[in-house]
Image (tube, helix red, strand yellow):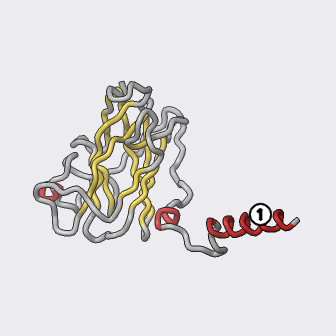
Amino acid sequence: MRRTGLVQVVLLLAASTFAQPLGASQTPWQKLHRPLHLPRLAAGAACPVSQVDRRIDWQRVGIFGGSGIGRGPVYPGLGGSGGHLDVTPDDQYGGPWAGGKVFWYVRPSYPGRVLIRGRRLDGPQSLGFNGGVVPKPELRIHNYSVSWEGQPTGSRGIPSSVRVRSSGCYGVQIDGTTFSRIVVFTVTAP
């Protein structure tokens, strides 16, 4: 009986060491995991591609992709073709996913973290980022950046691979601490 009581006390102490107190605050990333509000499109419907933000001097910003689409403050640069991304087969892992390079530019006016998730709007397929044989379901932009020539003071950005399995109309939801934006683009897969 005494040994059973000691075992129960040890187990209780071990459990309390790993348990979070009630009402514990969320991590910064959990706070950005808002419900997805990406629209669904009927098969054959026109894709409502996001436009280049003309308020930004993209030539001065000098990002890969030439210019960003959407309302910001976070923009995908899709390789100079506005709202279209061409992807190529996965040569590195040999899986069924194709990918294309996208540079995510964050304006100096927004200093916080960014969470990006997406899916196909005119079909059931998902969209992923980077990863291995299977891409990651989200992309996180921290408070640091890669640097590039001509980078405006205070701006930041990161490159990623956007990965899909088929052509179509895709959308991403970009969540920051003070905003949630949808950006839509088309993808051509091999």
Q: Which residue, given by chain and number where applicable, does mark 1 sit on?
A: 7
Q: Is residue 8 above or below residue 59?
A: below
Q: Say left or right for 152 vs 71.
A: left
Relative to 35, residue 190 above or below: above
Q: Amino acid at mark 1?
A: Val
Tally of numbered tags: 1
Image point (44%, 46%), residue name = 171
Q: Could you say which is closer to the camera, residue 157 or residue 185?
A: 157
Q: Kindly give the residue lying farthest to the front in the view shown.
A: 2
Q: Residue at x 56, y 57 (%)?
A: 35
As rendered, which of 77 and 71 lies closer to the eye?
A: 77
Quadrant housing residue 19:
bottom right
Instruction: Report helix, strand or loop for mark 1.
Output: helix
Question: Looking at the picture, how far across and down is residue 173, in whole percent?
Answer: 45, 54
Q: Residue at x 41, y 45 (%)?
A: 48
Asked if 180 appears above or below 36 in the picture, the reply is below
Quadrant placement of the C terminus: top left
Q: Residue furthest right?
A: 1
Q: Is residue 34 left or right of residue 14?
A: left
Q: Quadrant of residue 89?
A: top left
The residue nearer to you, when weighing 29 against 51, is 29
Say few, some or many: other residues with alpha carbon within 10 Å of mark 1 (under 14 / 14 to 19 / 20 or more): few
Which quadrant of the rendered structure holds the N terminus? Answer: bottom right
Percent from the top left, x then y, of residue 72?
A: 33, 61
